[in-house]
Image: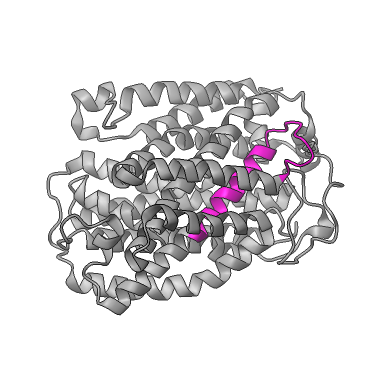
Amino acid sequence: MTTAPASSATTIAPEYGDKVIAVETAGSEPIPDAERHGSPLQLLWTWASPNIEFATVYIGVISVLFFGLSFWQATAAILLGTAIGALTQGVLSLDGPRFGVPQMVIGRFSFGHKGNLLPSGVNALVAGVGWFAVNSLSAAFALNTLAGLRPLPSLLLVVAAEILIGFIGHNFVHVFERYAFPALAVVFLLAGVWTFKDAHLGGGGASGGLGGFLLAFSTAWGYAAGWNPYATDYSRYLPRTASRFKTVLYPALGLFVSVALVAVIGAASATILAPKDASPTAAFTGHLPGWLGDLTLLAIILGAISANALNVYSSAISVTSLGLRLPAWLGRGMLVVLSGVVGTAAAWASLSDAGSAYEAFLLVIAYWVGPWLGVVLVERWLRSRTTADEELARRLGDRSYTNWPGITALLIGIAVSVPLFSNQEKYVGWVPEHYPSFGDITCLVGFAVSGGLYAVLRRGPRGAE
């Protein structure tokens, strides 16, 4: 398959339209006006359903159990971090109706065609391997607890469903999220009410301090902003005339409410004594009555499938955004399958220590998302003030276009923030080693350094020519 340049709009079969049971043929090429359909409202449940799941619960759990925060401290950090990540999700979604291309193609503005290979490749790996593995594990443990099926068969059943949804494509993903949303919302709200009834909200850790707060904030921001590199993947089919306000509002609202509510429920659950040697999912449901515990386990499975349908789909879209000349058989659908197979292997390898692996992963994903987001937001602000859409569309399709300030700022932001501020089990940067109260602010520093440096290097509209 040859990925068409962004200026071409002739490669999509015109009969796709709004059909649900039809395999999508589009890759990274712009969606023609004849294929545009839908409304911004669909972005509400598309970004809410994937976060009503156990991976989101675990943000609150680790904030209390591992970062040493009280319930109220954890709640404040979660709300703040999630709000920032959700806001940028809404802003970035605007470029979907505007240009009709995936988020990683939009990245060519910031990094040029060649420079954009790096963030596109990283996003493909993070989405299709990292996130796919994390969410598949939570679903597999839930199925193991619910049905007594061994972890590996549980994992294989879950990933088969996730890959199938992603393989069918864009319209089916939106419809699946729409129908999953009410079921997930009702079950998790019931579990939340029961959890708060039994929780000790005055309990939790008390030794986290500022460092623990910053760790929880970074985790919540990293989780919410981790969706930012997918933003226009799910808004690019919207008509050009779609309301700008609603295109910002609905993804931001869906993401914020779902992440904040479910993560806070997780923080409350961490104040309840869990059964000894229980799996993460069994610990969360252990205090619930049997019928509600079983429903919650089913919802955890459904939520993980909802999240991974997006992860495996966007991983494949990120690969098509690389602009590589791929064989005809290796289209978007087959890329979904390959991504799912690799992600399944990663999940299998992590079955024995899922909790520790997830804690580290939540922090590490923000290490690249922060600098990437800093550059992308500055570039978006600059081009919105200086350049016409027609010229921008031509730039997306121009393979000779380069933007060395963007990739330079991205790499320097990572090079500065990670060695100095990283606070991981296997590596502690200079700042947290000498000043533990700073926790882990790698993502914040990377965002500020890369965004600020890019603004200086870019120096107006001709700085990247």
Q: Nearer the viewer, residue 351 or 16?
A: 351
| Vertical order, 21 against 279 (above or below) | below
Color scheme of the displayed model? one colour
Counting from the top left corner in percent of width and height, residue 410 is at 52, 26
Counting from the top left corner in percent of width and height, residue 79 is at 34, 55
Q: Nearer the viewer, residue 24 or 232?
A: 24
Image point (61%, 59%), residue name: 165
Counting from the top left corner in percent of width and height, residue 301 is at 43, 63
Farthest residue to the bottom: give it: 291
Q: Which residues are magenta?
A: 305-331
Question: Quick check: 226 left or right of 292?
Answer: right
| Vertical order, 405 against 19 (above or below) | above
User: In the rendered image, which quarter is residue 350 located in?
Assistant: top left
User: In the rendered image, which quarter is residue 153 located in?
Assistant: bottom left
Question: Is 309 covered by the magenta stretch?
Answer: yes
Question: Quick check: 196 left or right of 124?
Answer: left
The tally of labels here is 0
| Vertical order, 184 against 75 (above or below) | below
- Residue 210 shows in the view: yes
Image point (48%, 21%), residue name: 412
Q: Nearer the viewer, residue 73 or 429?
A: 429
Image point (54%, 32%), residue name: 375
Counting from the top left corner in percent of width and height, residue 401 is at 74, 25
- Residue 169 shows in the view: no
For the C terminus, give its image quadrant: top right
Question: Is 334 covered by the magenta stretch?
Answer: no
| Vertical order, 231 against 210 (above or below) | below
